[in-house]
Image (cartoon, rainbow, N blue to C red):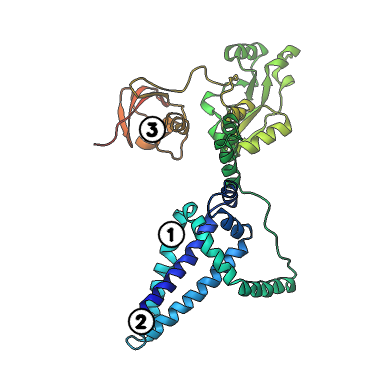
Amino acid sequence: MKILLLIITLFLSGFFSGSEIAFVSVSRIQIEIWLRKKLKGAANAFYLSSQPERFLSTVLIGTNIVNITFASLITYYLQAYFNDFLIVLFNSAILLLLGEIIPKTICRKMARRWVRVLALPLRFFHLLFFPIIKAINFVVNGILIFLGQTQETTSSFFSRRDIEILIREGEQIGIVGKEEWKIISRLFRLSSRQAREIMVPRTEIVFVQITDSMAQVKKTFQQCSYSRLPVIEEDLDHICGIVHSADLLKKPSHLKQILRKATFVPESKRCFDLLRQMKKEKISLVILIDEYGGTSGLVTLEDIMEELFGDIQDEYDKEHQLFQLLRDGSIIADGRAEVRQINEQLNTSLPLGNYETINGLILQTVGRIPKTGEQIQIDHYRIKIIKASGKRVEIVNLRYQPFK
């Protein structure tokens, strides 16, 4: 009988601890989706989660009652055999391990599975403790009023994760179309990506110099087929403006007469914030600067819109794809191809790090520019250098080849 009482109180301690972490880990919008699907246990889970103080008060009161009971029982049963220090040590270790750590770890990892199961018994205890909960809430509200605070209502705002869950669920049941889901997913990704991740890098920027003659400027436009070009004074770290090809129709005698103001933004600026800035200022090209004030690249409005709607062929796009899956299962890739895009589109697992491109991955791994024909192993991929120059790796062949 003694052992049974200890087991029951210890089990209840784990139940209350696990219930708390399970309800905290599951989004309220997810529980609402279960409720609309009429899943078993969803109604009880929604009742408790709709007002968080319901389950929080229940688990806190329940945890304290069973923990005090367990401590009292263990002290009563063991005081004839051990001193007080050992009893307290044993009691704390058992409650911490079996009543807190293990239940919370299990319920946190399997919260979606357990929250509806735990909801029914937890609601029973909520009704059982209801008089105590009301008394405690009365005292708490009195203290808040005395301090000049009012009881806050549940927030009507959803987190980003809540919205993602809701939209994903809508896509699965057909309310949200696949194309709409893709655009919304890209919108979320755009809000977290930095401008440097989508920029035209410094090494690929075509520019004109402020001292160039108008004939030279026209020739540069004809050769590159771009409609906007940065204008530099000494080098790319000293950009003094932007020139538009349409302004050449004004037949200026000097480049300064049609020079437009250049907009500089940090390369770490979020793409979504950059889109809003470009829309507000009505600009279609910005220059990115690094932490030292040097030019790191440029971003066009088309680059950002491409992140939302997929490929948009604009003047700065490359005429060829930067990577391609071959029939033999290997991948041919330009050194400028982004590692993240290869992983996403070809379902590879190339390592990510403080770099964006294949060239950056190789340089960080081997610490140098490999020679043409050289082969290197990076994680589970064998990379053969098809072409390399003195400045960068240009073309590679990647093949999945796990360690033996």
Q: Is residue 21 left or right of residue 328?
A: right
User: In this rendering, is residue 81 above or below 184?
Assistant: below
Residue at screen point 34% across, 24% down? 329
Instruction: Assess disc 2: are there few (<14), some (14-19) or many (≥20) residues with their C-alpha within 10 Å of its C-alpha.
Output: few
Q: Which mark is residue 362?
A: 3
Task: Give percent across and percent down for residue 65.
Answer: 51, 76
The x, y position of residue 72, in whole percent, is 44, 82
Q: Quadrant of the C terminus?
A: top left
Between the residue at mark 2 and the residue at mark 1, the CA separation in whole angstroms equals: 27 Å
Q: CA distance from mark 1 to mark 3?
A: 39 Å
User: Which SS class for mark 2?
Assistant: helix
Which dot marks residue 105?
A: 1
- Earlier in the chain: of badge 2 and badge 1, it is 2
10 Å crowding of disc 1: few (<14), some (14-19), many (20+): some
- The amino acid sitting under disc 2 is Leu
The kind of residue on which mark 1 rests is Thr
Report the Cα–Cα distance between label 3 and label 2. 58 Å
Name the residue located 58 percent from the left edge and 55 percent from the top edge.
43
Among the 4 quarters of the image, the one containing residue 173: top right
Find residue 303 and report its image quarter: top right
Q: Tell me if I can see residue 259 in this picture.
A: yes
* Residue type for callout 3: Ile
Check if mark 1's residue and mark 3's residue have beta carbons within 8 Å. Answer: no
Q: Residue at x 60, y 55 (%)?
A: 46
Outermost residue, bottom side = 80
Q: Which residue is mark 2?
A: 86
